[in-house]
Amino acid sequence: MKTHEPPTSVEIQERRRIRIALIIVAVAIVGLAAYFYWSFHPNRPVDYAEINEHFKYGSIGSEPANGIPYWIFKVMPDMFPEKLPGGYASLGLIQEPGHDLPIGFSKRRVIVDRVGLNCGVCHTGTVRETPNSQPVVFLGMPAHQLELENYIRFLTAAALDPRFTTDNVMAFIDARTKLGPIEKVIYRMSIPLTRDALIEQGTRLEFINKRPDWGPGRVDTFNPYKAIQFHWPMDQDESIGTSDYPAIWNQRPREGMQLHWDGNNTSVEERNKSAALGAGVTPATIDLDRLKRIEDWLLDFKAPAYPYAIDANLATKGEAIYRQHCSSCHDFASALVGKVTPLDEIGTDPHRLDSYTYTLSSNQNTLYAGYPWRFSHFRKTNGYANMPLDGIWLRAPYLHNGSVPTLRDLLEPTDKRPKDFYRGYNVFDQKNVGFVSNVPSEGNQQFFRFDTSLPGNSNSGHTYGTNLSAEEKDALVEYMKRL
């Protein structure tokens, strides 16, 4: 019978060393895996507990498909200062003290950190009481200083520049930060991919250079959809859809109203998901939970109250005039609010309405196909929707295309309204309600001259109240400060 000799002390020590070595290797593997997971996790957004911060800086899912690697975004103004004098702030982006990115820009780790757009970029603005006042940030108001078209143009011009090479971009990044060896490899792979993506985007959106400039506070909402979402040949489409950004507070009572300027959708949820696509989200990358945080908050987020003095007696007189001439179309409780007024009645510029076609509405109702939230509410209309006037003091310039600088100007006949004025100034005109529009520049900043004679910029139409006396008009404007 064969017997087993007990292991010697040397054998026991050897086995113990092997076990310890295996444990060390296993721990090292787990640690290395954890390092790679947390350092290069494929989908990890920066989150914010406070809803205001989330609205301004939180992700809605635009980074994975259309985001720019963080350090490329940061160094592009350094690389091409002649293309963007003043940096990103010169585009009307709002930079808050203590924040790394402008309002409306979010960060998400997608292998490396990437920067994308969110709701705040188009729906946050600033106001100054006087030229010497500090700007006050208001969430939910139109981004009346944002020059999104020039942001697109800058990205395209930078990508097309022969200096946009891997070695050159890395040199500018190295001057700003110290990347780890693995992150350096990833960035060296990402730079040419980013350049090609920006050039492709610029090629698809090249049509915007053949239309009148958007200027600050305006965007062609649906023509980029044709180019980006559906790859339409835009050289065969000469339509102009430029319009002002809307305010987005008080969304709960807007459910069921005809939304967008032309009233082409009656679903707040669809409108929100459509806007997310415009910010760079795709059906595969939309972050439903983080978008819903914003949607839920906006349901009952109230318009900011007018912060300056109001002549109470004059406003009381104006209220009676408002009830007689305005409330039937613009009060939340009225039968006509959120309904479309036909173009031949409202008489405002037709280009935005004409740019949205039956064919486009049919195509939009295929978006998010395969998901329970597939679009189904888009429709072509024959006019412009009657908007509620909550927070109207913050929504200048007026009409769907932003062609009338102040409420007081809107109460004048078309031929008495300013034929040209300047957009992009954030000093408030308390008398006329709007932003000061006769100042061409401040310091090194040149404001945008808005020419109402250009296609899509007409200030005609909406002649309601133009026959009132001057005193009645002043009273009406005074009352509307309270809305």
Image (cartoon, helix red, strand yellow):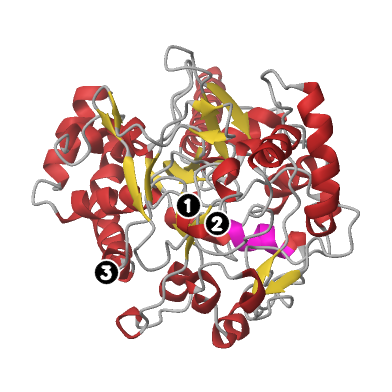
Q: Secondary structure at mark 3?
A: helix
| Residue assigned mark 3 | 210
Q: Earlier in the sequence, mark 1 or mark 3?
A: 3
Query: Looking at the picture, which amino acid does disc 1 mark?
Result: Lys
Q: Is residue 333 left or right of residue 74?
A: right
Quadrant for residue 373, please give it.
Answer: bottom right
Residue numbers of the magenta segment = 270-276
What x and y, as percent, mark residue 341? 71, 71
Q: Is residue 66 above or below residue 216?
A: below
Task: Look at the magenta stretch and give its main secondary structure.
Answer: helix
Element assignment for label 1 = helix
The residue at which mark 1 appears reads as: 416
- What's under tag 2, amino acid-wise? Pro
Q: CA distance from mark 1 to mark 3?
A: 30 Å
Distance of label 2 from label 3 (alpha carbons): 31 Å
Task: Please tell me whether residue 239 is drawn above or below residue 432 in the rendered image.
Answer: below
Dot 3 crowding, Cα within 10 Å, few <14, some 14–19, many 20+: few
Q: Is residue 174 visible?
A: yes
